[in-house]
Image (cartoon, helix red, strand yellow):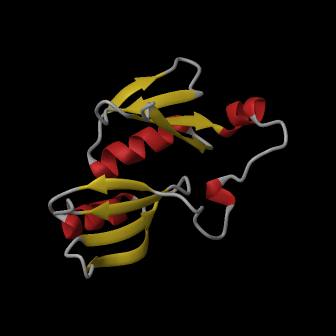
Amino acid sequence: MKLGYTIVYVPDVHASLDFFTQAFGIERRFLHESGEYGELETGETALGFARHDLAETHFPGGHIEAHSSAKPLGMEIALVTANVPSAHKRAIAAGAFELAAPAEKPWGQVVSYVRCPDGTLVELCTPIG
């Protein structure tokens, strides 16, 4: 078993892909012609985005839409970078909301948290070790 991909359900796949490109410099890998699904160039494990209406076909009981939630959902996307303060500043300039400014953790890692316009919680962090 291995992790194949993570899918974040969002209101507008195109907007989320564009935001991640602008805020984090991650290029688009794929956008389906329907606009219902797209992926970013994140290496072997894909980071994908799908529209909420597609999620409704998978989850007939409904789901929590991150962009409508007052608080971030209890999961995050972690992006590793050598320069967290610079990445954090770029994300805020692109429209992310600051949840926690860059800070060094007791184990030596620098970490910050932002919330994307689509509600996705992103941790920006230096490599561990």
> Which residue is located at x 51 percent, y 20 percent?
32
Q: Position of residue 4 (x, y in %)?
A: 44, 30
Name the one closer to the observer, 68 or 6: 6
Please, which residue is most extreme toward the front here?
A: 1
Quadrant (top left/top right/bottom left/bottom right) for the C terminus: bottom left
Asked which quadrant contains residue 93, the reply is: bottom left
> Which residue is located at x 33 percent, y 43 percent?
21
Name the one closer to the observer, 46 or 88: 46
114 left or right of 37 in image: left
Q: Position of residue 16 (x, y in %)?
A: 48, 43
Quadrant (top left/top right/bottom left/bottom right) for the N terminus: top left
Q: Position of residue 94 (x, y in %)?
A: 36, 57
Q: Is residue 121 above or below residue 26?
A: below
Q: Is residue 122 above or below residue 42?
A: below
Q: Is residue 120 above or below residue 103?
A: above
Please, which residue is most extreme toward the right here?
A: 61
> Which residue is located at x 15 percent, y 60 percent?
82
Number of marks in picture: 0
> Which residue is located at x 49 percent, y 41 percent?
15
